[in-house]
Image (cartoon, grey):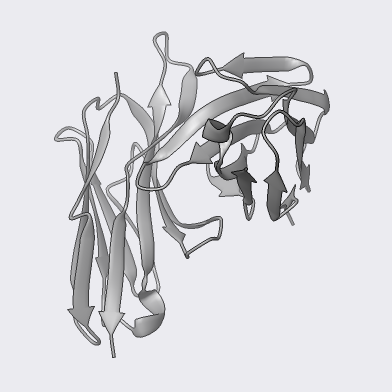
Amino acid sequence: KQEVTQIPAALSVPEGENLVLNCSFTDSAIYNLQWFRQDPGKGLTSLLLIQSSQREQTSGRLNASLDKSSGRSTLYIAASQPGDSATYLCAVTHMNYGGSQGNLIFGKGTKLSVKP
Amino acid sequence: SQTIHQWPATLVQPVGSPLSLECTVEGTSNPNLYWYRQAAGRGLQLLFYSIGIDQISSEVPQNLSASRPQDRQFILSSKKLLLSDSGFYLCAYTDNQNTEAFFGQGTRLTVV
């Protein structure tokens, strides 16, 4: 059974710091991995999608890496800003037995607070 | 462009009352549709997913049901709400290439 773990559960940093959020998954048979941002009381906003054949994706100050063999992904945020404060969720699209695509399985998230 | 709409944003319902939450998707055909629940302090739990009209799979036994009467419409229902049904409900879709997932803005349900 696929399980996704995110460490740390919460993180507080001063503005301007570079930071790394971690995500690990137990089954390397995945189609892709996606990072989301969730503001309090809101839905999820997709940040980056990494296909299983890719090693990383970049968007602005965000960079996500994927090491499928070790079951790990990291989200790197450069020059953090107070507006980056939110909960960051990692999810993998599981691959079913037989190779068909399964469902998104989420970690519990990392709550990030960037202090001005 | 593709968009997903979910309503209502908030809902307060008494125990034993029925429920209907609606989700619609625009700008794509034959999407995979999902209902998730997010309880406080817990991760997102997949409730239902659908790969086509009237094709619904349930991930967990519960007091809820889902229907997909049209290609881009997904409805979450209950005949009689329980206190434990309170939570934040999210609808999501992936396109027919099963790639990136997009979420609605969620419905905060409080059962009193």
x, y (%) of residue B49?
A: 60, 25
Q: Residue at x 29, y 18 (%)?
A: A1
Q: Which is nearer the eye, B84 or A26?
A: B84
Quick check: B80 left or right of B90?
right
x, y (%) of residue B20?
A: 77, 35
x, y (%) of residue B88?
A: 55, 46
Q: Quadrant of residue B87?
A: top right
A23 vs B50: above or below: below
Q: Residue at x 56, y 55 (%)?
A: A43
Q: Residue furthest bottom?
A: A116
Q: Which is nearer the eye, A22 or A100?
A: A22
Q: Residue at x 53, y 61 (%)?
A: A41
Q: Residue at x 74, y 57 (%)?
A: B1
Q: Quadrant of residue A106?
A: top left
Quick check: A115 left or right of B16?
left
B104 vs A93: above or below: below
Q: Residue furthest top?
A: A98
A99 vs A17: above or below: above
Q: Residue furthest left?
A: A70
B77 vs A59: above or below: above
Q: Which is nearer the eye, B19 or B67?
A: B19
x, y (%) of residue A113?
A: 29, 74
Q: Quadrant of residue A82?
A: bottom left
Which quarter shows the C terminus of chain A? bottom left
Q: Which is nearer the eye, A40 or A114?
A: A40
Res. B97 in view? no
Res. A30 in view? yes
Count the labels in the image: 0
